[in-house]
Image (spheres, rainbow, N blue to C red):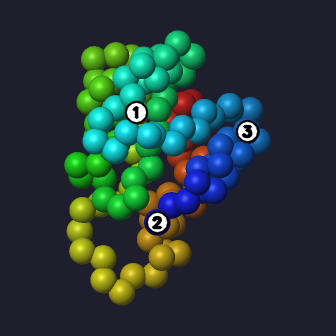
Amino acid sequence: MYSWFFFEQTAAELSKKGIHATVINPTYITGLDTDLLESLKKDHRLVVTMEDGVLDGGFGEKIARFYGSSDMKTYAFGLEKKFYDRYDYEKLAEEYNLKPELAAKKILDLIK
């Protein structure tokens, strides 16, 4: 569903508003790069993940669990767990903020 371009576009949208976003492509499929996640605590206050599918049981849940006892806020973009049959992608993307400009707006709302 997502491409690296989507993440870069979202970061570019945030940059227009004076927000520097760090874009990271996680290299661990089943685990977490805990050293990297710990280092983000120094100069970040929000970590956003974007699922390639449904949120339930996804990477975002792992990140939220990792930061659970810290002051770091987390937010995961993705789909609800339900059956999507013959859907219009544009409508679905609008509903779940899965367009760079919508994702950036949601992120700005979260950090206000």
- Residue type at numbered disc 3: Ser
Q: Residues within 10 Å of mark 1 (few under 14, many from 20)?
A: some
Q: Is residue 12 above or below residue 32?
A: below
Q: Count of labels shown?
A: 3
Could you tell me which secondary element the residue under label 3 belongs to? helix
Relative to residue 60, is residue 6 drawn left or right? right
- Quarter of the image that includes the C terminus: top right
Q: Mark 2 and 3 residues: CB-CB less than 8 Å, in contact?
A: no
Q: CA distance from mark 1 to mark 2?
A: 21 Å
Residue 51 appears at what percent x and percent y? 39, 53
Earlier sequence position, callout 2 versus callout 3 = 2
Circles 3 and 1: CB atoms closer than 8 Å: no
Residue at the farthest top position: 42
Q: Nearer the viewer, residue 55 or 28?
A: 28
Which residue has dot 1 on it? Answer: 74
Classify mark 2: residues with Cα within 10 Å, few (<14), some (14-19) or many (20+). Answer: few
Amino acid marked by disc 2:
Met
What residue is at 34 percent from the left and 32 percent from the top? Answer: 32
Compared with 101, 61 (above or below) is above
Pick whichever, 15 or 6, lies toward us: 6
Residue at horizontal 46 percent and vertical 81 percent from the top: 88
Residue 1: image tag: 2
Q: Residue furthest bottom?
A: 86
Q: Alpha-carbon distance for marks 3 and 1?
A: 19 Å
Q: Amino acid at mark 1?
A: Thr
Q: Nearer the viewer, residue 7 or 95?
A: 7
Q: Could you tell which of marks 1 and 2 lies nearer the N-terminus? A: 2
Give the answer, above or below, for where 78 lies relative to 91.
above
Dot label at residue 15: 3
Q: Secondary structure at mark 1?
A: strand
